[in-house]
Amino acid sequence: MTLSGRQKLTIIPLLLYWPAIFIATHIPKVPIWVIRAHISDKILHYIAYLVLVFLLWFAISPYKKVRWRRAAVWWVLFVIAWYGVVDEWLQGYVGRNPDVVDFLANLTGAITSLIVLSIFPFWPASLVLTGIVIFVLTNFMQANLADRLPVTNAAFHLCAYALFSLLWTRCMYHLLPIKAPQTKWLIAALAVPTGFMLATELFSAVAGNGFRLRCVIISAAGITAVVITIFLTALFHIPDKFKNRR
């Protein structure tokens, strides 16, 4: 069986990601960085299953949105629900406490992912889910992270917004008539990630976490690095028809 390019984009990360979150939930002691950052484990459970269901769905059905009348979506939800139950049950054997609320957070993340996947195709869904992860992590578990774990906080903002920008440029390729290296493309490529970043940080400030200029600068650096790299690559790219003439 030959896998499509999109399946490779999801199956390979899924084979790495699923065992990773299983190991993470069965470590006897909660990692010190989680304790120091005062991170809610319910948020981590929500995010973990949000991403897990996204990868699982597109590994199974790489070119189809979720259709609630199809059996496949209910099988995915059934498998994830039972995995969540088994996951919580097994934690009792490694010195951790099984928690019904953790299971509900898992299920909420899974359902959120399926709802997004029922509305958007692959690339827009990737963008929306990445945005959800960034927004949730920024506003619900980042209050102490900037001060307690500055390196981790900086890496999160740099990588998260770089990924968001990369996914947005991919969506632009499918949704908009403009292409790099057009000036309109450059403006649009920078505007959406920057607008999302500023809206997220402003919401954080209104919620009482303060406006963190350092986070804004680091996030802007991640956005700019990705967009400018794509723009310059397109600008200096020599079309194949010209290469063949040499």
Image: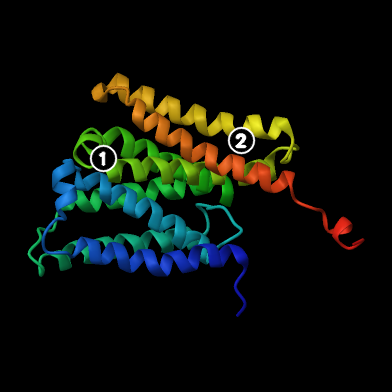
Q: Residue at x 37, y 63 (%)?
A: 17
Which amino acid does the dot numbered 2 rest on? Ala
Q: Is residue 227 above or below residue 242?
A: above
Spatial CA distance of label 2 from label 1 is 28 Å
Q: Is residue 82 visible?
A: no
Q: Is residue 211 above or below residue 233?
A: above
Residue pointed to by mark 1: 150
Task: Locate the N terminus and report the quarter of the image it occupies.
Answer: bottom right
In the image shown, does 179 or 115 lie closer to the viewer?
A: 179
Secondary element type, mark 2: helix
Tell me if 72 is positioned left or right of 204 in this view.
right
Q: Is 150 situated above or below 58?
A: above
Residue 16: percent from left, percent from top: 39, 68
- Kindly identify the amino acid type of the residue bearing the numbered disc 1: Pro
> Which of disc 1 and disc 2 is earlier in sequence?
1
Image quadrant assignment for residue 232: top right
State which quadrant residue 76 falls in: bottom left
Measuring from the top left, give residue 160's x and y in whole percent.
Answer: 42, 44
Query: Image point 52% across, 54% down: which residue?
Result: 69
